[in-house]
Amino acid sequence: MLAKRIIPCLDVRNGQVVKGVQFRNHEIIGDIVPLAQRYAQEGADELVFYDITASSDGRVVDKSWVSRVAEVIDIPFCVAGGIKSVEEAGQILSFGADKISINSPALADPELITRLADRYGVQCIVVGIDTWHDAATGRYHVNQYTGDEARTKVTTWETLDWVEEVQKRGAGEIVLNMMNQDGVRNGYDLHQLNLVRDVCTVPLIASGGAGTMEHFLDAFQTAHVDGALAASVFHKQIINIGELKQYLKQQGVEIRVC
């Protein structure tokens, strides 16, 4: 059995790490490189960096900080932000990223997933899915351009259909960003994760809602995800990664402990 992964998420805007609630009202957390170093030292299995306004601004992620991060950490990291071509992805990988993630660009051009997988291999192609639960209908819908409140829109894709589609096109991993839970620390949406797990055969990463160590345990033991991504509980030092991993190991979760 592969070890489960703990993955801090660093949302980047204007060269700094920020964090919002339900993708809104972002506050500045700190500088990119020191935070990356801290999480690597605490025992994170990998890091994910989202340049949250790159797609909505029509630009690609700033590669200068990608190379700086690669110089100071020795764990894998994934970068997302406005990647719309094979060439742009290649540049980010050449600057030191281990994986690239696409979200809004994949919705605009689903064939991009296949082109990237064919060129670089499915193992380094991640698709992020921003999913919103409509309480009125009970359905889950995929959102696009969520980094800019003015441009955010609900797409025609329902979440489960899009999960199946991106796998057919070559996604090697899926990060499910559950927007309703984002930043509120009330736990992951286990019902949605179980629905997605049933149709997802590639590694599945849960994102949005972690507030306690038990929430991570629930995601692993109830929804059987491969990794759990979180931001605010790590940024605000509510949970220490090393202590979290010790707790999970004690609960029987297969996890790498430093």
Image: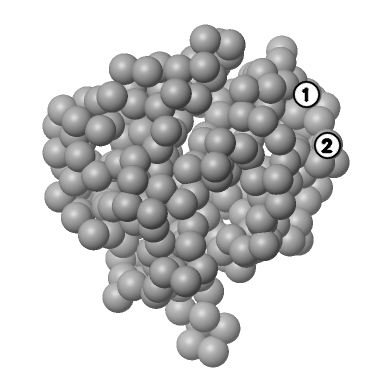
Instruction: Find residue 34 and report its image quarter.
Output: top right
Q: Can you give x and y, in whole percent of width and height, for residue 103 in the image?
A: 36, 51
Which quarter of the rendering shows the C terminus?
top right
Q: Amino acid type of disc 1?
A: Gly
Which residue does the numbered mark 1 point to in the structure image?
242
Q: Residue at x 37, y 18 (%)?
A: 95
Horizontal relation, residue 26 to residue 135: left or right? right
Q: Which residue is drawn at 53% across and 19% down?
A: 69
The answer to whether 108 is drawn above or below residue 219 in the figure is below
As helix, strand or loop, the secondary structure at mark 1 comes to: helix
Horizontal relation, residue 162 to residue 23: left or right? left
Q: Nearer the viewer, mark 2 or mark 1?
A: 2
Q: Can you give x and y, in whole percent of width and height, for residue 28 in the image?
A: 70, 45
**Considering depth in this image, is 202 or 112 the residue closer to the camera?**
112
**Considering depth in this image, is 26 or 46 the residue closer to the camera?**
26
As helix, strand or loop, the secondary structure at mark 2 comes to: loop
Q: Residue at x 23, y 59 (%)?
A: 108
Q: From mark 2 to mark 1, how far is it between C-alphas?
A: 12 Å
Q: Can you give x and y, in whole percent of width and height, for residue 76 in the image?
A: 49, 20
**Considering depth in this image, is 134 or 104 the residue closer to the camera?**
104
Q: Residue at x 62, y 29 (%)?
A: 32
Which residue does the numbered mark 2 point to in the structure image?
237
**Considering depth in this image, is 68 or 184 the residue closer to the camera?**
68
The answer to whether 4 is drawn above or below residue 200 in the figure is above
Judge the density around disc 2: few (<14), some (14-19), many (≥20) Cα neighbours within 10 Å. few
Judge the density around disc 1: few (<14), some (14-19), many (≥20) Cα neighbours within 10 Å. some
